[in-house]
Amino acid sequence: MATIKDVAKRAGVSTTTVSHVINKTRFVAENTRAAVWAAIKELNYSPSAVARSLKVNHTKSIGLLATSSEAPYFAEVIEAVENSCYSKGYTLILCNSHNNLDKQKAYLAMLAQKRVDGLLVMCSEYPDHLLSLLEGYRNIPMVVMDWGKARGDFTDTIIDNAFHGGYIAGRYLIERGHRDIGIIPGPLERNTGGGRLQGFLKAMEEAKITGKRRVDCTR
C-alpha cells in the first residue's frame, strides 16, 4: 500500500507539500499540485483517515447509540439520520445496544476512541446508570432523542409532543363518529405512553365521552 512518502517521491516534492495539497492548508503552485495529484492517482494512494482527523481535529463521523434498528419507528429515524449525515459528508456509526449496559459501555468507549464528532442517543429506556454513563462522555457533543423530559445539562434533547399526538389521534376518531374507542399507549411511566394517554383522555373529555373500562396489558 502506497504511503505519503511514496507520493512525495514520485511527485518530486516533500511530504509536507503533499499534505498541503491534500488538505488544502496552504497555497501550492498549480504545476506542483498537478504533479502531486498525478502521483496519487498512479499509486492509488488513499490518505489515512486517522492521520487526517488528528491534523484537522475532526473525523466527519457521528455515533448513534440505539436500542435497536429493527423496530419500524427506530428504523425510520435511523434511516433519516443516516441520509442527513451522508448529505453533509459525514459517516454514521450505528450501535445497537438492546438496552444492555455492558454493550452500551463498550460502544460508548469505542466511539470515544474513534473520536466521533458527535453522539446521538436513541434508547427506549434511560435508567440512572445509563444517564451516569452518558454524563461521563459530556466532552462529546451529544443529542438525546426519544427521551421525554430533559434530564441533566450535559446534552441537548429532542422531546416529542406525546400529549398532542394522543390528543389529535383521539380527535381524529371522534370527528369520524366513533364513540367506543380503545387506546394502547405503551408503558405509562415513559413520557411517550403517559403523554399519549393524557392527550387521548383530554380529547374524550372535550367530546364528553366517558371511558367505560380499563384493561392493563403487561409484557
Image (cartoon, helix red, strand yellow):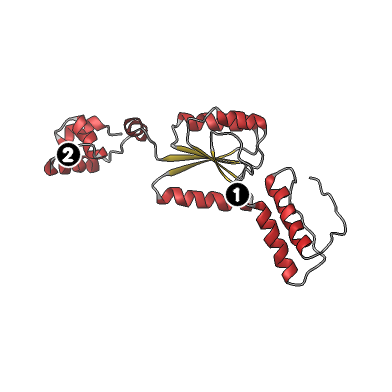
The residue beneath circle 1 is 74
Residue 8: x and y in percent read 19, 33
Which one is in front, 195 or 49? 195
Which one is in front, 51 or 174? 174
- On-image quarter of the C terminus: top right
Q: How many marks?
A: 2
Residue 149: x and y in percent read 63, 42
- On-image quarter of the N terminus: top left
Q: In 3D space, how far apart are the residues under numbered discs 1 and 2 (Cα atoms)? A: 46 Å
The residue at the far bottom in this view is 177
The residue beneath circle 2 is 27
**Residue in the picture at 70% in, 66% down:** 172
**Residue in the picture at 80% in, 63% down:** 181
* Left or right: 75 in relation to 35: right
Residue 70: x and y in percent read 62, 48
Disc 2 secondary structure class = loop
